[in-house]
Amino acid sequence: MYSTNRPTVRTFTPMNHLAVYGNVTMIRGRCPHCKYVALVVQKHWTCCGRALKTEDNWKKTKRMCEAVNRRKKPSPEVQNRILTQQADCCFWCDRHFGRYVYYDGTPQRLRVHWDHLEPFARSRNNADENFVAACHICNHIKSSFVFATIEEGRVYIASEWKKKITVQSMSPLRIRLRAETGISGVL
């Protein structure tokens, strides 16, 4: 025997978000007109072609599928171009690579790390424009933080430097030892 009860009508809750397909981000949500889940392409819903009425602040993201790319370094040509543009200095702290600093009381030589401006963990973006040369300390401090502006990132990193790092020039004895031994690792 068939039931005469009508099926329950589900209310549609907004589920609009930025959908990340590999390296591509698109607006995805429930169309207010036809109630289908669809993408927004060039400010139009793909389900019915109607225009997107409001420019919501799409804060929520959802990864729909993984990017094919794996984390990688820029090519040697791109590395040389970046180092030349940055004058062999860290993008974040503007200190020369190879300079010695004291990090928590331990002397360390600043090494080059290839940093993603927009963190790879978030965007899976290995494009050449997304790389900068950062010292290993700034790269560690920045981690996967996302900053609204580059200047905001530099201010944050500078404040973290002040907490843990003291910059000292090498003593004349160290310079003489390095010159005599020819070993650059002599502190």
Image (cartoon, helix red, strand yellow):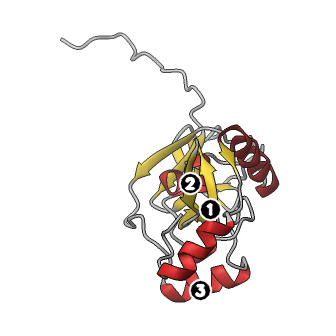
Residue carrying label 3 = 80
In 3D space, how far apart are the residues under numbered discs 1 and 2 (Cα atoms)? Answer: 6 Å
Q: Are marks 1 and 3 in contact (CB under 8 Å)?
A: no
Task: Name the side, left or right, on which 6 lies relative to 171.
Answer: left
Q: Are marks 1 and 2 in contact (CB under 8 Å)?
A: yes
Q: Which mark is residue 100?
A: 1
Quarter of the image with the N terminus in it: top left
Q: Dot 3, crowdedness within 10 Å: few (<14), some or many (≥20)?
A: some
Task: Name the side, left or right, on which 133 lies relative to 166.
Answer: left
Q: Is residue 19 placed above or below 135 in the rendered structure?
A: above
Element carrying mark 1: strand
Quarter of the image with the C terminus in it: bottom right
List x then y, in percent, for residue 151: 81, 54
Residue carrying label 2 = 107
List x then y, in percent, for residue 43: 71, 57
Residue 65 visible in the snapshot: yes
List x then y, in percent, for residue 24: 53, 62
